[in-house]
Amino acid sequence: MSDNEALLTLFALLYALECCVWLGRDCVVFGAAWGGDLRPAAPHAVLGNRRLGLVIGSPLPPLGELLPCPASPVSLTRMAAYAYVPLTTDPAGRPPQSERLVLLDRIESLATPGSGEVRVNGEVFVRTATPGAAAGVAEMLERLRSLPEAGRERVLDEATAAAFEPARVSGRVEAWRRAVAPLRIAACALFVHLFLATPWLVFHRGLERAAVPALAVLAVLEVLVAGLFYRAHAKLRSPAKWERVLLSLAMCVYPPLALRAHDRLAIGVLDGCAPLAAASVLCSAGTFREYARRALLDARHPRLPACPSEDAACRAASEEARRRTCAAMEALLRRLGLDPDELTRPAERATDPSVLAYCPRCQAGYTMRDATCADCGGMPLQAR
Ligand SMILES: [Zn+2]
């Protein structure tokens, strides 16, 4: 391998690393690697650690989107906040959760240090997938604790309704797509320059003669991408000025980062939106139906144990929040013309006479009635 080929290979590897995004396991990621309909998925089950999993973005900047949607990390009631949520559509199971319970009237201080943490009374209460999600949790806790107990129920209902509002999702996604459109075009030009034009130039004219024009065009394109990123960031995340400045400067000197600039701006777009509402806007009808079926089955029959704590207050908070979420899911589905009961009916099992029972959560069929579903934590079966 010549020096030029080795350099190109090294650069391609650096770019491939930049295409790998590490996202919190409490995210549902809406992505399409080569364009087309977005599909919901969980971060990679094996590649990652307990908190983060790998997600691979589309290697070609003009194609594909990657929109992470952090699920709510806290079960809220008018009395307490419990840093545990029993719901997940991730086949690998629930993400790690702090399982801390705080009574709203005992909250004396709230802080979001900026790394996705929410601190209550000086201690870490919950870690969220994005800084924006942490700010949302802190804002809600602040609002709830400032209200008398009687007024909190209405706030919780309003917040749940807002999270399940498809118009909120479509408004944010449209704003993001408008803001990053010129950025993606510039990133595409940079991609062509780095992976097609420059190698062609070096191959035909030699490195010494190609270096100056190639580097000059590279510098222009990088500054262009950094400028467009700065402008789009200011539109989408105006308060985060230092993040904007530092990333823009980094893009001027590190081309792989500039090529993935639009992915950076996708993080936070769906903060505060329920994954089901996001799926209703971003996915095709068939994909949404399948995702909604899985999400609703999980919400109605969460994997056992539904709550890891024996504490009555923890169990009550988890169950109350689950019921509220489940009701919001069913309401959204009805608004969209889907019957929740019809959607979750195990229709295909009815045609197989050997199936005597099924798991209400994953709907796996069983040829015996007196068993439990190990995949769902020992869920008791239901007779056909
Ligand atoms: Zn099951």
Image (spheres, rainbow, N blue to C red):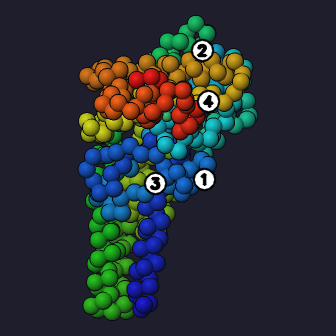
Closer to us: mark 4 or mark 3?
Answer: 4
Quadrant holding the C terminus: top left
382 vs 17, nearest the viewer: 382
Closer to us: mark 2 or mark 1?
Answer: 1
**Residues at marks 4 and 3, CA–CA distance in whole angstroms:** 28 Å
Residue 108, x across and y down, in percent: 72, 24
238 vs 56, nearest the viewer: 56
Look at mark 1 in the image and give the residue it sits on: 49
| Label 4 with label 2: CB-CB less than 8 Å | no
Q: Which mark, by number, is residue 305?
A: 4
Mark 3: C-beta under 8 Å from nearest atom of ligand 1 = no
Q: Quadrant of residue 145 in the image? A: top right
SS label for mark 2: loop
Quadrant holding the N terminus: bottom left
**Residues at marks 4 and 2, CA–CA distance in whole angstroms:** 24 Å
SS label for mark 3: strand
Identify the residue shown where x is 29% and y is 57%: 34
| Mark toward the start of the polypeptide (4 vs 2) | 2
| Mark toward the start of the polypeptide (4 vs 3) | 3
Q: Quadrant of residue 332 in the image? A: top left
Residue 43, x across and y down, in percent: 48, 49
Identified by mark 3, the residue type is Val
| Mark toward the start of the polypeptide (2 vs 1) | 1
Identify the residue shown where x is 29% and y is 64%: 188
Residue 368, x across and y down, in percent: 49, 30
Identified by mark 4, the residue type is Pro
Identified by mark 1, the residue type is Asn
Identified by mark 2, the residue type is Arg
Look at mark 3 in the image and give the residue it sits on: 55
| Mark toward the start of the polypeptide (1 vs 4) | 1
Q: Residues within 10 Å of mark 4 (few under 14, many from 20)?
A: few
